[in-house]
Amino acid sequence: MIDIITNQNSEKIIKEVDRNSTLLIVGKGATNHAINQIVYYDLPETVYGHYGQCNLSDAFNLAKKIGAPHVFLANIKNSHDYIGLANTLRQYDFAYIVLTDIFFSDYFYDSTRNDKKVFYCQHLLEKISSYNHSVLMMTDKHASLYEDIDAYLKDMKSMIAEYKATASAKADGKNLCFVANNLRDHQLANVVLASVLCTKDLSVYPRHTYGPAIFYINDFDIDGQELIYFRSNHSVGTTVENLVNFNNKIEPEKIVTVDRIAKYVKRNIDLSYFKGQPLGAYQKLRVEKALKAFLDPLIDWILKDYAIKSIRLVKVSPGAGSIEVELDILPVNSIERFSVVVEG
């Protein structure tokens, strides 16, 4: 069972900080400190003192060097503890979750599904996607282990194809990113990208001093696969390319920079005040006024335009229930509009 422990008021921090800039790093510590517990820290020295020299501590150190403001850790010793972790993560909406000791291609055989092969990332997404908007950012073997670009990309594409053939619809593809581990100076590119996204304004592209990339990968090398990769350029340095998730629909939310904006809107619209109240004409006007008060300041920052498509009552019980709102938004990084549904 995974717990939240009160380290500098960890649970309060999780709930009160900007959820769009929170990062949870999950991995195996070199010590038994805070096993199966989610803990908040500020300083790398403290983390190394508690968890020792390990990927978990190194990832925290890297995230803080990049500037990630709110970094949480979970020391997971056994693979079956990821089941407990998934159940706990339903309660906490971290922006990004990275695993330091489990790769995208790692799997187990699930005894509850007749020993079916299940990817760890698939399992986590199936458990949490209906409860929050956390993005699981995975990576795999380091590119330096491969002789050439062809062997590397063949392996990565094979992993993607196998995952897509196995994962169920319950594992929401919008909440999964696969980052090529092709940065020369970093062993975990998913930690790098997640940390950078935590530091960047929602309206800008995630540029950073990533350091040199291994292999010169182009769009045509990817063939439309869901592989985010890094490419070194003489004029602009190293850039991150093909920022897509595993959404199986061809729509703007497949782009990570656009999906970040959609998640910001979903996380920050608060309809709880209207919950349990009858939805008459006057109440609809009040909801619409509250929505406009939130959305209008987003114009020229992360939205070009928006429209309130519908305000309706769901889960009706004796004339009351929850308010569900459907919005049509045009993000700044998109030329297409799409719908966002918020329930409160």
Image: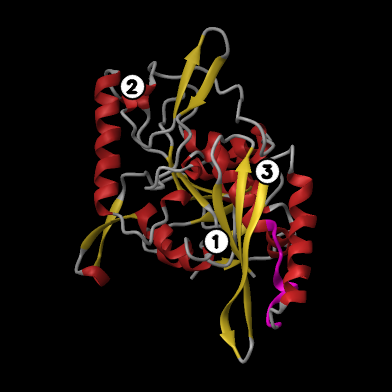
Asked if the stretch drawn in magenta spans residue 272, the answer is yes
- The amino acid marked with disc number 2 is Phe
Asked if the stretch drawn in magenta spans residue 273, the answer is yes
Q: Is residue 260 left or right of residue 69?
A: left
Q: Residue furthest top?
A: 234
Residue wearing tag 2: 220
Disc 3, SS: strand
Q: Which residue corresponds to the image point at 29% horizontal and 52% vertical from the top-left?
A: 107
Q: Position of residue 267 (x, y in %)?
A: 65, 57
- Report, in whole angstroms, how far the alpha carbon at label 3 lies from the one at label 2: 33 Å
Q: Earlier in the sequence, mark 3 or mark 1?
A: 1
- In the image, 250 versus 138, the foreground residue is 250
- Report, in whole angstroms, how far the alpha carbon at label 1 lies from the one at label 2: 34 Å
Disc 2, SS: helix
Q: Which residue corresponds to the image point at 37% horizontal and 59% vertical from the top-left?
A: 123
Q: Position of residue 117 (x, y in %)?
A: 23, 57
The reply to whether residue 167 is in sight is yes
Q: Position of residue 263 (x, y in %)?
A: 59, 51
- The amino acid marked with disc number 1 is Asn
Q: Is residue 154 left or right of residue 172?
A: left
- In the image, 133 versus 3, the foreground residue is 133
- Residue 132 circle label: 1
The reply to whether residue 23 is in sight is no
Residue wearing tag 3: 305
Residue range corresponding to the magenta coloring: 268-277
- The C terminus - image quarter: bottom right
- Report, in whole angstroms, how far the alpha carbon at label 3 lies from the one at label 1: 25 Å
Q: Residue furthest front?
A: 281
- The amino acid marked with disc number 3 is Asp
